[in-house]
Image (spheres, grey):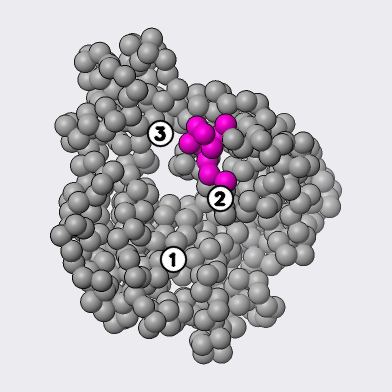
Amino acid sequence: MTANPRRRGHAIGLTGRRSECGVLDRLVDDVHAGESRVLVVRGEAGVGKTVLLDYLAGRAGGFRVARASGVQSEMELAFAGLHQLCAPMMDHLDRLPVPQNDALRTAFGISAGAPPDRFLVGLAVLSLLSELAGERPLICVIDNEQWLDHASGKALGFVARRLGADPVGLVFAARVPGEELAGLPELVVGGLGESDARALLDSALAGPLDARVRDLLVAEAQGNPLALLELPRGLTPTELAGGFGLLGAVPLPGRIEDSCRRQLEAVPAQTRRLLLLAAADPSGDRSLVWRAAGRLGIPVQAAAPAVEAGLVEFGAWVRFRHPLVRLAAYRSASFSERQRVHGALAEVTDPAADPDRRAWHRAQAAPGPDEEIAAELERSARRAQARGGLAAAAAFLERSVALTVDPARHAERILAAAQSNSQAGAFGKAHELLVTAEAGPLDEFASARVDLLRADRVRLGPRQRRLPVAPQGGQAA
């Protein structure tokens, strides 16, 4: 693909982003010319990072484009984000050196084995991208990097610093990039200028608007494109005529979420339940969502109002218009409603193929302490730790603690969670758990373990803040 004048600096539907699009155009040109490029697109929620990534993918004609997106509720699942990116590439896995092949298969749970070496996992991904780029230029797009699970973030940060002469573009988008991306080239995306903001707002309005109200909306949005598009949605002309001054006390993401919530309130109850169900399992697996919907008695017709309102797409995958729509769909439901949908999702999740996700849904659905689920979470923690997912193991163990009744098991699991958090570098959380443990009854062995963990934190803390210490027999992630 060569540079062409239709592309250069022109982004239909990207009001006021000529400069940003130019940066992405040059990245595509460089990769097409055989060079590797890394870029971190940085900006606040709703500023248009995802739209810019879509623009990039659309400009990569003739390239292979691989995409992944961090999801808040998957931050506990080790290598979930990396698997999302690499799943379509797995037919090339056998081309990798055996140690790298084995490490990636173990990390993804395809085969059993010793805990994968973090270096080998990163090297395997690097080799995999190189293999694909040998066939045609490759663009990898990772959205919502701030929500990647810890293990995936580390692996992709490793890869980003070691791309060689292969035609590979690796582009991240994040509100605040993690330390794994520190020092990499950045494209900072700010708010739109006033004239562009007015033009975008006008495109979202169904009719004429009082000039003073328009000025207020533009000022409230602070150039944030999503705010400009979302704030007028779902409001009557009367509501648009005034009242927006009351929104000034709400942070911008909250205002956008309020707009999303108003749109949710406008669709039927069964449609809201379906959206809650889809939001509770962010895998995007359409078949899973519909199986769970069947358990809850939600008809297929319930999707139509949400699709017509532009809230979600039910294509090959279930995709919300924006992460804040997903967040609003989940937060606007009551605790008992969330429990019911998590219960339905647990029932239809294959315990053999995806035991960890099933355990997590069961835990979210539990009405109270439950030893069976607590033990299942403990097993999930062991599997996560075996894959090098220390942060994931800590999350499973913390939830296991909340579901445990027996005082002795409760103390054991608190200490195990504290140890996992410490190994993952979460020293504040580890300290909180140790304080909780000390407040309860401890036998002599448990007390000694608390002392040992405190001593390890003092001895290893400063070093672990830079590089988490691996559990016995494995590598940190």
> Disc 2, disc 1: CB below 8 Å?
no
Q: Position of residue 458 (x, y in %)?
A: 51, 61
What's the residue type where badge 1 is placed? Ala
Pick the front one: 3 or 269:
3
Res. 66 mark: 1
Pick the front one: 308 or 267:
308
How far is the residue under mark 3 from the one under mark 1?
28 Å
Pick the front one: 218 or 319:
319
- The residue wearing badge 3 is 253
Q: Is residue 101 magenta?
A: no
Of mark 2 and mark 3, the one earlier in the sequence is 3
Query: Which span is picked out in magenta?
Result: 305-314
Using the rendered view, name the quadrant where residue 274 is placed: top right
Left/right placement of residue 465 relative to residue 202 reads right
Res. 14 mark: none
How far is the residue under mark 2 from the one under mark 1?
18 Å
Using the rendered view, name the quadrant where residue 386 is placed: bottom right
Q: Is residue 309 magenta?
A: yes
Residue in view at x 42 percent, y 59 percent: 142
Res. 315 mark: 2
Tell me if mark 3 has few (under 14), some (14-19) or many (20+) residues whose alpha carbon lies within 10 angstroms of its own: some
Left/right placement of residue 111 relative to residue 26 reads right
Q: Secondary structure at mark 3?
A: helix
What's the residue type where badge 3 is placed? Pro
- Reply above or below: 464 against 222: below
Count of numbered badges drawn on the protein: 3
Residue in view at x 69 percent, y 46 percent: 290
- Reply above or below: 375 against 240: below
- Residue 430 shows up from this direction: no
- Residue 368 shows up from this direction: yes
Tell me if mark 1 has few (under 14), some (14-19) or many (20+) residues whose alpha carbon lies within 10 angstroms of its own: some
